[in-house]
Every structure is written in structure tokens, then in C-alpha cells.
Amino acid sequence: MMSEPTPEISRSVSPSEAITAVELRMMPRDEVLALYHRLEAPPFEEMHGEFAATLLDQGSARGYLLSAFTVHLKGRWLGKAFEPTGPNQGHGYNYYMTPRGVRRATRMKTRLGPSKLPGDTNDAFHLEYADLNDFKRGGIGGALVHTMFDELRKVSTGLYLGIGRAGFTEKARADLHPFLLEGPVAPFVTTR
């Protein structure tokens, strides 16, 4: 007596679940931005610890140079870190490799809320730098950090897509700079 073959169990996979970090690194900027709009915000409590960062395709050499200049102001940018301090608020920092070792700086406030990107009202995980970084100290770099604002959405477990914005004019702040976060790769470090 032959048994019938067991039917294959199909599972519904969202478009983001099949995407790997390597695929995101190779994806053209326009596709990365389109994907971002389809993703959902991560659960707030999930964003806890240090996450490794990678700049993604910036669309042009100019875009890459601007992004690289911004993220590498304080050393070689390694990533971002987050710690919830309440149900919908928290704080964090960027971390960098310097000649003296890892430096944790460029602090931010974090929260969940509707995206600030044009035409996108879905929730995102927001990183707001203005309140925790002095506009007057640090010359042009300090002033640029004061203008930064990032949003994150979840691609899959341990994989997050970010959109960064910075600049002194509305036109500059309208330019979107995608990046990837993976992790957490280490615990959050309390800084002074």
C-alpha cells in the first residue's frame, strides 16, 4: 500500500523576508527606497544594543561622498546603538573606530512615529540628533550633525533598512541616504 505524498506546506513570505544583507548591499538606490516604503517599523523594544552599519548605494558618486563624509566625521563609522527608556522613547549613539579605539558619540533620541518622508505615513523608528548635539561646537561637522535625522524599518530578523537625511537647506535634507543595520551585535554601552 503506497501512502500519498505529503503536500508541501506553503508559507506566506513577505517580500522583505527573502532579502539578505548581501542583496541589499547590491541593490540599486531606487529599489532600496521602494523597498523601504513597503516595510514596517520594528517593535520598539527590539531596538536594543549595538548594530553594525553599512552605507548602501547612494545613487551617485556625489551622494556617496556626502554620505561618507557625514558618517565618518568622528572616525570610521561602525554602527548605531539604541536603548529604550520608556514604551515609545529611548536614546542612542553612533560608534566609530578611531586611532584610540572605539568611540561612542553623536547621540540621538529615539521614538516610534509616522514617517517624515513625503507620501509615507506608516510608522518608522526615528533617530533625532538635534537636541543632543551642539550646533555651535565642532565647526561644520557639529553643525551638520545637528541637521541629521534618520528613520529605520525592519527587513527581517536582525536586518534593518535606514534612511538618513542631513543638510543645511531643504533641498539637501530632501536627499535620502540609505544604510543597513545588522544586529544587535553587542550590548548597549552607557556613555557619559
Image (cartoon, rainbow, N blue to C red):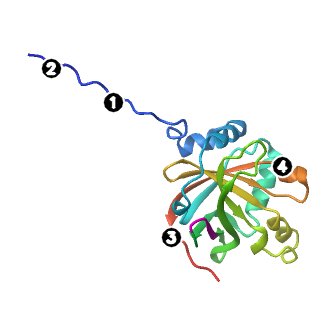
Q: Which residue is mark 2?
A: 3
- Classify mark 3: residues with Cα within 10 Å, few (<14), some (14-19) or many (20+): some
Q: Which residue is mark 3?
A: 187
Q: Give amino acid for label 4.
A: Ala
Q: Give amino acid for label 3.
A: Pro
**Pick the front one: 164 or 3:** 3
Where on the picture, by quarter, is residue 91?
bottom right
Are the residues at dot 2 and dot 3 in contact (C-beta closer than 8 Å)?
Answer: no
Q: Is residue 44 above or below residue 118?
A: below
Task: Name the side, left or right, on which 32 lies relative to 23.
Answer: right
Lower sequence index among marks 1 and 2: 2
Mark 1 → mark 4, Cα distance in angstroms = 44 Å
As drawn, the residue found furthest toward the bottom would be: 192
In the rendered structure, which segment of residues is drawn in magenta?
87-91
Q: Main secondary structure of the magenta part?
A: strand
Are the residues at dot 3 and dot 4 in contact (C-beta closer than 8 Å)?
Answer: no
